[in-house]
Image (tube, rainbow, N blue to C red):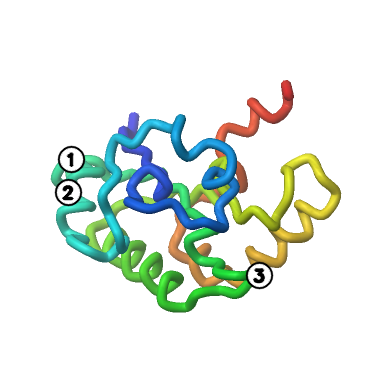
């Protein structure tokens, strides 16, 4: 049996991007256990130590925050590179990455997950971040999909 840990970038950020759907609908009701990070690559060693119990866990399930990468509908290359640097460090430490692409947080303009245009917006986004996907050992497109089935 393999053991790992799970974290969402959303839970780590000090400030939720204004483009994120949760900024509009739920920023005050969500738990903030790790809030305080401004930039993913700040204290990179410490972040990896915390989420892998000093590198004893070799599996990390990590949810990216698409609204952190997209600003006004355009990809922010600097922030995209933060993810690449973080994922590269995981790889250098032999930590397997399960990448979650949508974790109930997405840019407001994507719309509701049940709307017709949502899939198109997600696919366009994935085209822009395909380099990130190469770092993942496994990918899940949406967090806990069973919840959506019963909606």
The residues tagged by marks 2 and 3 sit, at their Cα atoms, a distance apart of: 31 Å
Direction from residue 32 to residue 52 in the image, left or right: left
Q: Which residue is mark 1?
A: 53
The residues tagged by marks 1 and 2 sit, at their Cα atoms, a distance apart of: 6 Å
**Residue at image location 57% in from the left, 58% down from the top:** 19
Q: Are marks 2 and 3 in contact (CB under 8 Å)?
A: no
| Numbered badge on residue 127 | 3
SS of the residue at dot 2? helix
| Nearest to the observer: residue 8 or residue 5 | 8
**Residue at image location 58% in from the left, 39% down from the top:** 25
Q: Quadrant of residue 73?
A: bottom right
Q: Are marks 1 and 2 in contact (CB under 8 Å)?
A: yes
Q: Is residue 46 above or below residue 82?
A: above
Direction from residue 17 to residue 35 in the image, left or right: left
Q: In what quadrant of the picture does the C terminus appear?
A: top right
Q: Is residue 20 above or below residue 123?
A: above
The residues tagged by marks 1 and 3 sit, at their Cα atoms, a distance apart of: 33 Å
Question: Residue 38: horizontal and vertical position, in percent?
Answer: 30, 59
Q: Which residue is mark 2?
A: 49
| Nearest to the observer: residue 10 or residue 133 | 10
Question: Residue 48: horizontal and vertical position, in percent?
Answer: 22, 52
Q: In what quadrant of the picture does the N terminus appear?
A: top left
Q: Residue furthest top?
A: 150
């Amino acid at each position: 049996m393999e053991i790992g840990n799970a974290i969402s970038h959303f839970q780590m950020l000090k400030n939720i991007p204004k483009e994120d759907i949760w900024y509009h609908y739920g920023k005050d009701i969500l738990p903030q256990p790790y809030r305080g990070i401004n930039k993913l690559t700040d204290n990179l060693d410490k972040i990896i130590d915390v989420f892998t119990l000093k590198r004893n866990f070799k599996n990390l399930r990590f949810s990216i925050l698409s609204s952190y990468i997209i600003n006004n509908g355009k990809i922010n290359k600097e922030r995209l590179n933060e993810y690449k640097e973080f994922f590269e460090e995981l790889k250098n430490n032999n930590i397997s990455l399960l990448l979650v692409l949508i974790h109930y947080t997405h840019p407001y303009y994507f719309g509701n997950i049940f709307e017709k245009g949502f899939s198109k917006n997600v696919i366009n986004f994935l085209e822009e971040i395909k380099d990130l996907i190469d770092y993942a050992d496994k990918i899940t497109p949406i967090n806990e999909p069973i919840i959506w089935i019963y909606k």
